């Protein structure tokens, strides 16, 4: 690495972290001001509030990283241009592609750190942040879905007419097991209640019916032989099911508290059960994969936009940078909404802003004067 690379890389990274700290401070103060009444109403101590913001700050920092690194790139390149340092560098025989090398190194470093933090570290702190918000900042959650259907195993299906998450009680419970598309076992209960001490379900007024069939037909005996069905009844029984009360808790931004591996497993679980709302989790997963590429594209675009000396000074270039970042956020939000609503495949929608801005950047690199 040459002295010039170290000089640009140092300015680039220092500006990036400075912009991040400034924005985090502003966002935190605004958020604290908005939530102060709720904190006071919940009688929270200063330590509890501070603990919440220790989890809040990394999460916000991860969200604003692509935009802040774009702003940092625009600012540094504009400063180099206005001081004619870019002209001197290019006049010395350094190509524009070589000029971009330290920015590429800086974006690689930030992208790698951001990917690890977003994938495995920040989700762990988000769990306590989300729990805090649900307990103190959000209205009490009531599970209102009715006629709940779940596939809990390849040939096992569960049904409940309704569930009360306050009393942790489900009503009109049914679990059916099939074999070769034939019903072999049906378990019903008037209601199921969660026992917090035993960590098991208590079934009330239950019935278990096992159906034993000989399914293969013989030519001489066209009717299958059917053995007598077994029927068991009871008033109360404790048992373990694959579901637990957490399945019916609020899923408010639950994906924020899941690591990459947990996201993949949870998406498979939702798919196997035929659950709705899986698109939001898929969007989050693919967004984490696309975020490092977003950083590279925005740094590349920022350097091209601001490396030319402007008569209006750095203010015009910085304003242009903010405009482009706003358009990018608009694109990202728009296509994320499409994906979460099921209008577009998530694996495609999250990449569209990167593809569009990547093409724009290549066009500007080829044709825009520098």
Image (cartoon, rainbow, N blue to C red):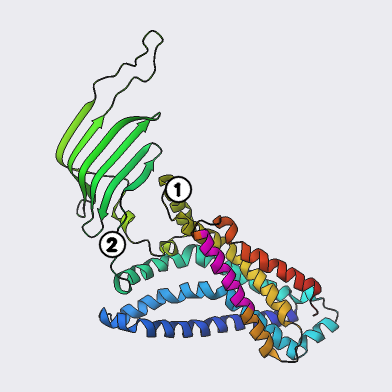
| Label 2 or label 1, whichever comes before in sequence order | 2
Q: Looking at the picture, how far across and down is residue 69, in whole percent?
A: 61, 77
Toward the viewer: 368 or 132? 368
**Residues marked 2 and 1 touching at CB (< 8 Å):** no
Relative vertical location of residue 15 with respect to residue 257 in this rendering, above or below: below
The kind of secondary structure element at disc 2 is loop
Relative vertical location of residue 344 with respect to residue 43 in this rendering, above or below: above
Q: CA distance from mark 2 to mark 1?
A: 24 Å
Q: Is residue 182 visible in the rendered structure shown here?
A: yes
In this view, the mark in front (2 or 1): 2
Toward the viewer: 96 or 284? 284
Q: Is residue 72 visible in the rendered structure shown here?
A: no
Q: Residue at x 68, y 85 (%)?
A: 317
Q: Looking at the picture, how far across and down is residue 357, in whole percent?
A: 67, 69
Mark 2 crowdedness (10 Å alpha carbons): few <14, some 14-19, many ≥20: few
Magenta stretch: includes residue 335? yes
Identify the image quadrant of residue 57. bottom left
Q: Looking at the picture, how far across and down is residue 302, in whole percent?
A: 68, 77
The residue pinned by badge 1 equals 271
Extent of the magenta region: 324-339
| Left or right relative to 338: residue 202 | left
Q: Residue at x 20, y 36 (%)?
A: 207
Q: Residue at x 40, y 62 (%)?
A: 254
Q: Looking at the picture, how far across and down is residue 285, in whole percent?
A: 51, 59
The residue pinned by badge 2 equals 142
Q: Which mark is residue 132?
A: none
């Amino acid at each position: 690495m040459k002295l010039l690379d170290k000089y640009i890389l140092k300015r680039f990274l220092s500006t990036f972290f400075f912009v991040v700290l400034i924005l985090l401070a502003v966002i935190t103060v605004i958020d604290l001001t908005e939530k102060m009444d709720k904190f006071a109403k919940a009688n929270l101590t200063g330590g509890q509030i501070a603990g919440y913001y220790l989890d809040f700050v990394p999460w916000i920092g991860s969200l604003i990283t692509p935009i802040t690194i774009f702003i940092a790139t625009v600012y540094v390149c504009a400063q180099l241009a206005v001081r004619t340092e870019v002209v001197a560098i290019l006049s010395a025989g350094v190509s524009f592609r070589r000029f971009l090398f330290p920015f590429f190194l800086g974006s690689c470093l930030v992208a790698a750190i951001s990917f690890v933090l977003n994938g495995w570290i920040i989700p762990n702190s988000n769990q306590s942040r989300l729990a805090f918000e649900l307990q103190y900042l959000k209205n009490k959650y009531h599970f209102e879905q009715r006629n709940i259907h779940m596939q809990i195993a390849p040939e096992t299906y569960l049904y409940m007419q309704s569930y009360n998450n306050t009393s942790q009680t489900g009503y009109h419970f049914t679990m059916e097991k099939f074999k070769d598309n034939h019903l072999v076992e049906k378990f019903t209960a008037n209601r199921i209640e969660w026992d917090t001490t035993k960590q098991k379900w208590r079934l009330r007024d239950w019935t278990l019916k096992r159906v034993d069939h000989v399914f293969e037909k013989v030519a001489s005996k066209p009717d299958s032989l059917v053995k007598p069905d077994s029927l068991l009844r009871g008033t109360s029984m404790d048992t373990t099911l694959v579901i637990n009360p957490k399945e019916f808790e609020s899923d408010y931004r639950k994906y924020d508290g899941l690591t990459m591996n947990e996201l993949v497993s949870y998406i498979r679980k939702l798919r196997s059960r035929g659950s709705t709302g899986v698109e939001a989790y898929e969007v989050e997963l693919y967004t984490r994969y696309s975020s490092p590429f977003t950083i590279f594209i925005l740094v590349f675009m920022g350097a091209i936009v601001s490396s030319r000396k402007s008569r209006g000074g750095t203010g015009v270039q910085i304003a242009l940078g903010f405009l482009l970042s706003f358009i990018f956020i608009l694109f990202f939000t728009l296509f994320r909404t499409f994906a979460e609503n099921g209008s577009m495949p998530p694996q495609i929608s999250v990449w569209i802003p990167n593809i569009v801005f990547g093409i724009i950047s290549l066009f500007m690199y080829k044709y825009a004067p520098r």
